[in-house]
Image (spheres, rainbow, N blue to C red):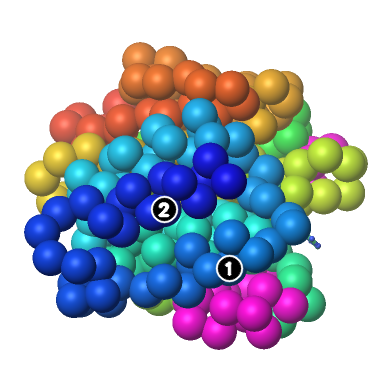
Amino acid sequence: MILLHSFAAAAVQGSGSPETRPNFSWKPILHYATSKVTPQQNIDEIRISFDVLRSLSPCNFLVFGLGHDSLMWASFNPRGTTLFLEEDPRWVQTVLKDAPGLSASTVNYRTKLSDADNLLSHYRTEPDCSPTQSFIRGNSKCRLALNMLQDEVYDKEWDIIMIDAPRGYFPDAPGRMSAIYSAAVMARNRKSPGVTHVYLHDVDRKVEKMYAETFLCKKHLVKAVGRLWHFEIPPATNMNSEFC
Ligand SMILES: C[S@@+](CC[C@H](N)C(=O)[O-])C[C@H]1O[C@@H](n2cnc3c(N)ncnc32)[C@H](O)[C@@H]1O
């Protein structure tokens, strides 16, 4: 209900009635007002990306993971591009059945959570993982690079990246290592003015924390609320041999 209040507040702010604004939709409000399932992020966590989305939208918003929050994220970015990357093709079908307007594509991750420590050693020894190289598309040697995404992901500059997937709570799950690494590379490669906002959820877990500190950098951490960290990552001015 508190979340619904945020939607409604966003809808009625500004001049004119909400319906007259381009791309305004009551659908998400109706959906969340009648749904018994709520998103996993809490209101305080959601609010920190909501505030940035409201100031940057329409913008390019990349979201790792489809879930009960997807319609909400897309509705916070009317007229912008919001693209969801999801590991589970069946879950894509399930979510799109109820929300066919969302843009989503499936990602075949090539990592396992149980390899998280080895992958950090691999990063330190594989030249193509180095920030001096800093590429993802076609990077087959660096196992942390998401090299299997659709071209749109590489061709766009993402203003906001939300990492709330893939699953990272059992050994055979893909873990968020490559999502975190790839988000850092995308942010460092930004050519447009401004920073890239990167949000990472579940930072109470060891792997998320370790990878965030290695690739997203404590010096870029601007907010920590609940289990969510917010980074503002500037474009890399010199391609150092370390991310942080
Ligand atoms: C931590 S969840 C993200 C959930 C999302 N932030 C939300 O609030 O619903 C990450 C992944 O779990 C899986 N997942 C989430 N909810 C699911 C469900 N009800 N059934 C099957 N898989 C689910 C999806 O693969 C998703 O990408």
**Quadrant field for ligand 1:** bottom right
Residue 218 point in image, percent of width and height: 43, 16
Q: Is 153 rendered above or below residue 10?
A: below
Based on the displayed image, in which of its 4 quarters is residue 115 positioned? top right
| Count of numbered badges drawn on the protein | 2
Give the residue at x 43% y 36%.
47
Where does the magenta region start and end?
94-115
Based on the displayed image, in which of its 4 quarters is residue 219 positioned? top left
Residue 50 shows in the view? yes
Residue 49 point in image, percent of width and height: 40, 40
103 within the magenta span? yes
- From the viewer's perspective, tell me whether residue 39 is left or right of residue 234: right
Give the residue at x 74% y 77%.
94
Give the residue at x 66% y 32%.
202
- Label 2 belongs to which residue? 7
Based on the displayed image, in which of its 4 quarters is residue 87 positioned? bottom right
Give the camera-side residue of 242 and 53.
Answer: 53
Give the camera-side residue of 181 and 173.
Answer: 173
Tag on residue 177? Answer: none
At label 2, the amino acid type is: Phe
Q: Earlier in the sequence, mark 2 or mark 1?
A: 2
- From the viewer's perspective, tell me whether residue 159 is left or right of residue 151: left
**Label 1 packing within 10 angstroms: few (<14), some (14-19), many (20+):** some
| Alpha carbon separation for disc pair 2 and 1 | 11 Å
Residue 177 point in image, percent of width and height: 63, 41
At label 1, the amino acid type is: His
Tag on residue 31? Answer: 1
Give the camera-side residue of 85 and 235.
Answer: 85
Q: Is 9 rendered above or below residue 121?
A: below
